[in-house]
Image: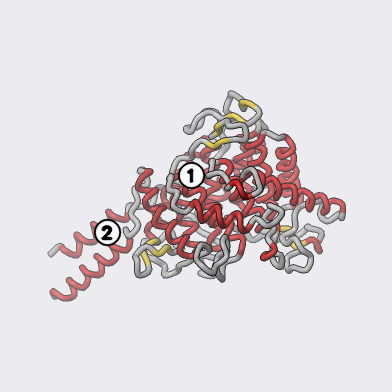
Amino acid sequence: MFFPRAAAFSSLLLLVHRSIAIEVDINDVQSISDAAKTIASQVMYYYGGDKPGNIPGLLPDPYYWWESGLAHDSLIKYWAKTGDDMYNDQITEGMLFQVGPDNNFMPPNQSTSIGNDDQSTWALASMTAAENGFPELPSDSGIDSWLQFAQNVFDNQVARWQGEIEDKTCGGGLRWQIYSFNNGYDYKNAMSNGNFLQLAARLARYTGNQTYSNWARTASNWSFDIGLIEKDTFGVYDGTFVSQDCKKPNQVQWSANLGRYMEGYAYLTNASTIREYQDYSASMVEHALEVFAPEGNNLSETACQARDNCNVDQLAYRSILARALATTRAMDASTSDAITPVLQASALGAAAQCSGGKDGTTCGSDWASTKWDKSQGLGQDLSALEILLANIPEKQVSTVNGTSTSGRPGTPTGSSTSASGSLSATPLPPASSGALGQMASMFGLLAALGLAVILSP
């Protein structure tokens, strides 16, 4: 019986090796940073835009342009949270190459397929750069700051929104596609409109300009009125067709759509004293955990993951929700008890999934399993990277006048001020949050127990 036992022992050692290929202590910032560094290097492996013959800022097939913007955003956030500037030059080169001749992320090489959500994804990456003091643009770039890119995109999209009002198409809102010859022009989707709301909210917080706050409110009211945001549950539906007068929303729910709106409301909670924004973000947290963490604390893309049919876009969606949950927790301490266990358990699950491939660190998608699910790709890596970064405390963020801001008054990250002055000195009453299960069990302990069983006589 020696050989079966030896075989079992070898198999367990392999399992243990793979399950802890990316080791992480969820309570240790350096440990999380080290794990994030491994995954960031894998993101750059997929990128390749800095290699001879490739186009800076672009990902190869099958990845679309919006995911290139998402990857740049994640890598900027990686730098901001870990201090690792290894990829900063490539990030700057990619952003500048894709911003286009009008400095508004409308590059000619994307004119046949660009959507409002694509353009605003890159604008949000610019906001991440501005807020976190990403290294200044080269003197020959022809533009003063990362902020200007985001403002240019905002101005573009406001003009499109106003055009929709003038054309009497659903009372406003942004279409998915910018050009009428593209499939999707008839569709007003949550990603485009949630991105716009968040962009306006972040510009409002960063600049103190009330115009941005007003447009965020316009986008919020329209999203509720048209039914993209469900008024009772605060679920976010995928989109609605202009040809149906925007009266029959497509009710599929994706984590990214909810995440974009949730994070927008979190910024508005911080940038204003309007009570409803805090209620909205807290209610969206509750809904997110009910829908996207239905079996414990591990986030899942429930619309496709159970059937194993998520496409390349959808595999990256949880990266957006992970960022949103981290931002909401930082902006509103009343959500911390609900959010923290999910961020921690999901990060442990993601690290356990990053145990495949020849290198033993290839990331899969099923964060509820300790065994690599044999999937791999940029979306898996971006989601794993963002959920790890979500467990590193948020740093203070600069505004246009140099004032640092963090959470609302009373939050662990310090008091909050907007560009135009202090927010309310009294924290708003905490919003309700859903009940949560217990933390995921510790993988190392389970492996040790299994090993002890095998070695026992």
Give neighbour class at mark 1: few <14, some 14-19, many 20+ (Cα, 10 Å).
many
- Image: 404 above or below 306: above
Q: Quadrant of residue 214?
A: top right
Q: For the point 37% across and 47% down, which residue is it?
A: 26
Q: How is the image coloured?
A: secondary structure
- Image: 7 above or below 367: below
In the current view of this chain or complex, which residue is farthest to the front?
140
- Image: 440 above or below 354: above
- Residue type at numbered disc 2: Ala
Task: Determine the secondary structure under disc 2.
Answer: helix
Q: For the point 68% across and 52% down, which residue is it?
A: 103
User: Residue 267 location in percent, x, y?
Assistant: 61, 40
In the current view of this chain or complex, which residue is farthest to the top?
425
Q: Nearer the viewer, residue 272 or 431?
A: 272
User: Residue 252 location in percent, x, y?
Assistant: 64, 61
The residue wearing badge 2 is 447
User: Residue 293 location in percent, x, y?
Assistant: 50, 54
Give neighbour class at mark 2: few <14, some 14-19, many 20+ (Cα, 10 Å).
some
Total labels: the figure holds 2
The residue wearing badge 1 is 80
Q: Is residue 249 visible?
A: no
Task: Determine the secondary structure under disc 1.
Answer: helix
Q: For the point 61% across and 52% down, which residue is it?
A: 258
Q: Nearer the viewer, mark 2 or mark 1?
A: 1
Q: Nearer the viewer, residue 31 or 337?
A: 31
